[in-house]
Image (cartoon, rainbow, N blue to C red):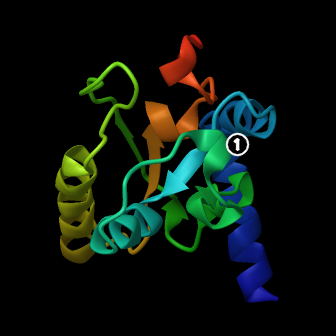
């Protein structure tokens, strides 16, 4: 079908531009990409960030989702300073600021979905820094 041919061309272009390398690192589990819509939803609920291991599958974007109808899914990369030694954002202040920016990108750009690399959410964290565990 024509739809299948265009999907095949997108995947070919993705891989020609290095996407295959990105896929292999993502599938290794070394890091994960978070769905910007999930971050916005979490902020709207008044949530506080949880470390990667505590997030459900619905928070993440699969490597298969990186190749989408318009080409490749954009990836937003960010890192924020930890506000306390035990948690990077204990009251959700940074989460709300980031969510506001992501919501603006989702609303005012042609992209209806964005992948986010946010160190605390995307990299494995020691689950118990409050009790002397090392964090990444």
| 49 sits left or right of 69 in the view | left
Q: Quadrant of residue 5?
A: bottom right
Q: Which residue is mark 1?
A: 15
Where 110 sits versus 52, above or below?
below
Q: Residues within 10 Å of mark 1 (few under 14, many from 20)?
A: some
Image location of residue 51, percent across then percent down: 54, 40
Image location of residue 103, percent across then percent down: 25, 68
| 92 sits left or right of 120 in the view | left
The reply to whether residue 19 is in sight is yes
Foreground residue, 30 or 24? 30
| 11 sits left or right of 90 in the view | right
Foreground residue, 82 or 122? 82
Quadrant position of the N terminus in the picture: bottom right
Image location of residue 83, percent across then percent down: 24, 27
The reply to whether residue 136 is in sight is no
Image location of residue 9, percent across then percent down: 70, 62
Residue shown at the point (28%, 30%) measured from the top left: 80
Where 131 sits versus 57, above or below?
above
Where 17 sits versus 6, above or below?
above
Foreground residue, 58 or 117? 58
């Amino acid at each position: 079908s024509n739809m299948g041919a265009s999907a095949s061309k997108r995947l070919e272009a993705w891989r020609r531009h290095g996407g295959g390398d990105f896929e292999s690192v993502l599938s290794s589990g070394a890091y994960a990409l978070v769905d910007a819509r999930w971050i916005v939803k979490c902020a709207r609920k008044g949530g506080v960030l949880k470390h990667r291991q505590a997030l459900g599958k619905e928070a993440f974007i699969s490597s298969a989702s990186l190749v989408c109808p318009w080409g490749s899914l954009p990836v937003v990369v960010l890192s924020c300073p930890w506000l306390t030694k035990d948690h990077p954002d204990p009251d959700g202040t940074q989460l709300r600021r980031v969510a506001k920016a992501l919501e603006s990108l989702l609303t005012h750009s042609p992209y209806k979905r964005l992948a986010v690399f946010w160190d605390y959410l995307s990299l494995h964290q020691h689950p118990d820094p409050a009790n002397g565990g090392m964090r990444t």
